[in-house]
Image (tube, grey):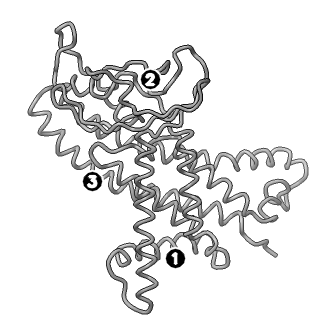
Amino acid sequence: MYFSNIFAFLFLISSTLFGQTEPTDSTTKSAVIEAHTGEEDAHGEAEAFNPGKMMMEHIADEHDWHFATSGHTHYSIPLPCIVWNKGGFTVFSSTRFKNEHHEEIAYEGLKLEEGKIVAEDGSFVLDLSITKNVASLLISVILLLVVFFTIAKSYKERIGKAPSGLQSAFEPIIIFIRDEVAKTNIGEKHYRRFMPYLLTVFFFILFNNMLGLLPGSANVTGNIAITLVLAVIAFFVTNLSAKSTYWGHIFAMPGVPKWLLILLTPVEIIGIFMKPISLMIRLFANITAGHLILLSLIALIFIFKSIGVAAIAVPFSVFMNLIEILVAFLQAYIFTVLVSTYIGAAVEEAHH
């Protein structure tokens, strides 16, 4: 559990620093919803529905947590903006960037540009704001800590007894990760060292994947900054735990002619970095693709404005939601299996 707390803390820091790298359109999400309902713009003309813009805005990060729009009423939760620039640290609500008509405005020399806070004079700005993705990340971490402290307490109080409550719900998954993932890929001798890490990775991805399926939720695991942090941690856990045998197979593979090492060693070194890169891209791409397919089906209703299309698109959307639940588990499992495989190769004993 101590390792899990450190892991969660690293996620909070990293996501605050890098969690706003995804590009967003400068138009607010409310304008997209108004386009859905065919509301008129300032010139009295109906704003055309832009499916691409709608999909990008729904999967991207933002400085307030927007849920819905009804007429001219916008339902959203303002989030704290934490900014450091030449004037020092400034903390204010994200509502400062909106006027009474929900249009973006500047505040104290700062403005929103493509979803990022920038200075009007072009000076350096360090944005440490609690964005929607960071807020969702905080919620998932709190949820993880509550769930697993409860399970740990249940294990202590029910020694020798059958599991109950949350313990009975999560124990089969925990045992599966231990027996079918950790023991199989890392081995009986070393798997215990990495169980806290593997369980943290699995449940962190799973919880955020499931939270991302809720209406109005954030797309945490579909943010490449989050998957980057996951991949970097996997990289360090793997390589800092590696034995001399592992490095020997990379820099001086036994049984390979010396002249061939000139070709193979650079390939092996590149492979060290390609493994975490593949982890990062695989999780990001699969989660983002699922959201985009679901949003595409919904967009068809507004593009064709037909009850017949809606009768087809809605059942397909429900089906895709069910598939997304399966993908949420599958991607958490695949990430954990691959990481355990990399660790197993790093701590493998020398063969005699």
SS for callout 2: strand
Mark 2 residue type: Leu
In the picture, measured across the screen, residue 140 lies left or right of residue 216, that is: right
> Residue drawn 52% across and 76% down?
179
Residue 322 image label = 3
Which mark is first along the chain, 3 or 1? 1
Q: Quadrant of the N terminus?
A: bottom right
Q: Nearer the viewer, mark 2 or mark 1?
A: 2
To which residue does mark 2 refer?
112
- How many residues crowd mark 3 within 10 Å: few (<14), some (14–19), many (20+)? few
Q: Residues within 10 Å of mark 2 (few under 14, many from 20)?
A: many
Left or right of 34: which side holds 52? right
Q: Which residue lies under the disc numbered 1?
A: 179
Which amino acid is tagged 1?
Answer: Asp
Taking the image as shown, residue 262 lies to the left or right of residue 139, namely right
Residue nearest the observer in this picture, 101 or 213: 101
| C-alpha distance separating marks 1 and 3 | 27 Å
Circle on res. 170: none
Q: Which is more foreground, mark 2 or mark 3?
A: 2
Q: Earlier in the sequence, mark 2 or mark 1?
A: 2
Question: Where 146 falls versus 256 (above or below)?
Answer: below
Type of the residue with mark 3: Leu
- Work out which residue is located at the far top of the displayed protein and give it: 43
